[in-house]
Amino acid sequence: MHSAKPTDVLLSARVSVRYGEKPPVLHDVEVSIRRGEVFGLIGQSGSGKSTLAMTILGLLDRKKSQVEGTIQFEGSNLLQLRERELRELRGCKIALVLQSPLSSLNPALKIRTQLKEAWRAHASGSASDCDAAIRAAMESVSLPASDEFLKKHPSQMSVGQAQRVLIAMATLHRPALLLADEATSALDVITQAEILTLFRQLNRTTGMSILYISHDLASVAGICDRIAILHQGTIVEVGPTGEVMANPRHEYTQKLMAAIPQIMRPIATATAASL
């Protein structure tokens, strides 16, 4: 496993987010992600997980949301960057993989075209440079880089293949941080396991940090070094995955653990403990 020094922090955030006069979606949420680690953010639907990811990327509507706090990333406070500076960062330094690959990919464009556009957004070079980058990205997610495959449209692939293409696109520029927001929840169990293994392999081979966002505590047991439990917009528990799963302290975490099917609980706990 790729390990990081405790002081080697890639991203440090402490934020509150609200929409209009409504109660905060995130209330003083504090998250610290180290270089080279897979950090899990766990919480049920509506707890604010995706809001945190969108806040990090600067994708919240600034006219409709109020964001307070700081998000330090490689020496910059992301909340103080202009839109032009954020566009330079998105997809290059910080990348995003969403839940539904067939919705995220453009159905009208061939896979090669979409990968080329992603490459040219943050790189300049010859056609051969672009082709080499695409080939390397496809190989890193165990997909063929043949002309036959790259000429396909998203609808001509399985959901699992489309998700791998999306991950290849997100990691094309070797970002320091990958945000995976419910990236396996639309997949069947076997494909989900394959994608989780892929995330861990990318983490180990490139040193890329991953913020893995999920509502499923069991699914993160095999890949996350540390996890934070988000409940009603607040972090209620954080720590090494094995410790949190083996000895959950907060009542909500205990309920999450109790929700894991009895037959899966020893497996999930043992897997987390081995990290």
Image: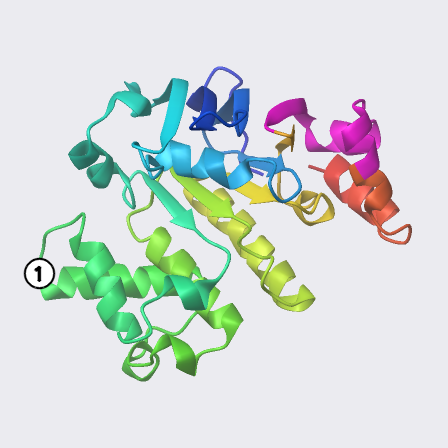
- Regarding mark 1 in the picture, which secondary structure is present there? loop
Q: Is residue 135 visible?
A: yes
Is-magenta flag for residue 38? no
Is-magenta flag for residue 240? yes
- Residue 86, compared with residue 189, is above or below; it is above
Between 194 and 69, which is closer to the camera in this rendering?
A: 69
Between 250 and 204, which is closer to the camera in this rendering?
A: 250
Q: Is residue 205 left or right of residue 151?
A: right
State the image quarter where residue 174 is shown. Answer: top left
Q: Quadrant of the C terminus?
A: top right
Q: What stretch is highlighted in magenta?
A: 233-255
| Relative image position of residue 193 (x, y in whole percent) | 64, 60
Q: Is residue 8 left or right of residue 135?
A: right
| Relative image position of residue 258 (x, y in whole percent) | 86, 41
Between 113 and 55, which is closer to the camera in this rendering?
A: 55
State the image quarter where residue 105 is shown. Answer: bottom left
Q: In this view, does 244 lie to the left or right of 106?
A: right
- Residue 70, compared with residue 224, is above or below; it is above
Amino acid type, label 1:
Ser
| Relative image position of residue 170 (x, y in whole percent) | 36, 52
| Relative image position of residue 251 (x, y in whole percent) | 82, 26
The residue drawn where x is 77% and y is 31% is 253
Q: How many labels does the image show?
A: 1
Q: Is residue 248 visible?
A: no
Q: Quadrant of the N terminus?
A: top right
Colour pattern: rainbow
Neighbour class for label 1 at 10 Å: few (<14), some, many (≥20)?
Answer: few
The residue drawn where x is 55% and y is 38% is 49
Q: Which residue lies furthest to the right in this view?
A: 262
Check disc 1 and report the residue beneath it: 126
The residue drawn where x is 25% and y is 37% is 89
- Residue 24, compared with residue 122, is above or below; it is above
